[in-house]
Amino acid sequence: MQASFPSAHDAPAVTAHHRGFSLLTEDGEFLTLSASDFRARLNSMPCPLVVHAPSVARKLDLPPPGQPSPWLDLLELFTFVYPARTAAPTPRGLALALGVEEDRIGRAEADLLPLLVEIMLAELARQKSGPFGEMLAALTVRLAQAGWPWAGTVAETLGLPDKLDGKGNLPEEALQPGDALRVWRVLPKWEDVAPRPPPASHPITPAEARTRLRTLLGEGSESRAGQADFASVSTAAFEPRTHRGNPAVVLAEAGTGTGKTLGYIAPASVWAQRN
């Protein structure tokens, strides 16, 4: 593990506002600076805490910071600690995602960022004893190899320095960085199932439609010949297709009071049950 990683515990913090930049220095001094004043201090100050580094760089008229970011972007730490959660990419949005109360958020000045880091590192410390503790340690080693600026602070939180050998490697019996990236190894196994068979298209007969109509009407109901004829004629609409995209069509007309609704439901329900 490199010794040159910045520490988030004594890092300055900066947030951008329409009125300028809010800066909490490493000495605890609270300043409001213009973009030009902040740019003048940037090269001489330690790696700062920011939220959404590309946005901060854009407001400073600086080129995109690139990857790995030269700043301690709290959104990156949030993604590492809470990989399945989302947050609006602003100091206020991140604070709300972490459950900070509105009264404490206030105007989301720079002094809010150390609190957010404290909350996330506390959650990370809790996770190191959980089922994913070994994976977090292995991923941190891999991210340190890639130059992730949070690697030093995260490693300290996970107690990694005491586990690494002189070359910065994990013990042989521990989960290795390369294996931690192979997440499919910890997924539950499943088997593919055969596709469902295509829907059937067995025909129905007029007699079956009439029988179903009598069942739907029940005993003692009025017998209407026109309704039974309508049900019989409608069965032709349920004939199997002879060509794809060519359904059978029946244009059946009956007067008011014939009972067209049940006259159609009768054959349709027989066909649905059979197929």
Image (tube, helix red, strand yellow):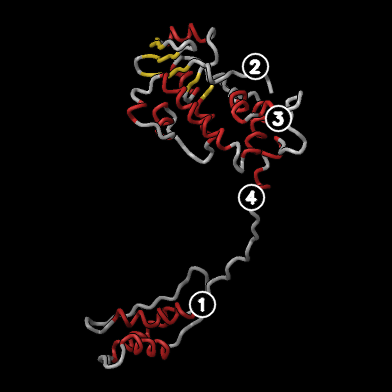
- Considering the numbered disc 3 on the image, is that residue within a helix, a strand or a loop? loop
Q: Which residue is drawn at 52% across and 37% down?
A: 82
Q: Looking at the image, is mark 3 or mark 1 nearer the viewer?
A: 3
Q: Is residue 179 visible?
A: yes
Using a 10 Å C-alpha cutoff, classify the residue at mark 4 as few (fewer than 14 neighbours), some (14 to 19) or many (20 or more).
Answer: few
Which residue is denoted by mark 3 in the rendering? 163
- Tell whether label 4 touches label 1 (CB within 8 Å): no
Please tell me which of labels 1 and 4 falls first in the chain. 4
The image quarter containing residue 83 is top right
Q: Mark 4 points at which residue?
A: 187
Label 1: which secondary element:
loop
x%, y% of residue 75? 50, 29
| Disc nearest the viewer among 4 and 2 | 2
The answer for how far apart the CA atoms under marks 1 and 4 are is: 40 Å
Q: Mark 1 points at which residue?
A: 201
Which of the two discs, 4 and 2, labels the residue nearer the N terminus?
Answer: 2
Q: Which of marks 3 and 1 is nearer the N terminus?
A: 3
Q: Earlier in the sequence, mark 2 or mark 1?
A: 2
CA distance for labels 4 and 2: 36 Å
Residue type of the residue flagged with mark 4: Leu
Q: Which residue sits furthest left? A: 256
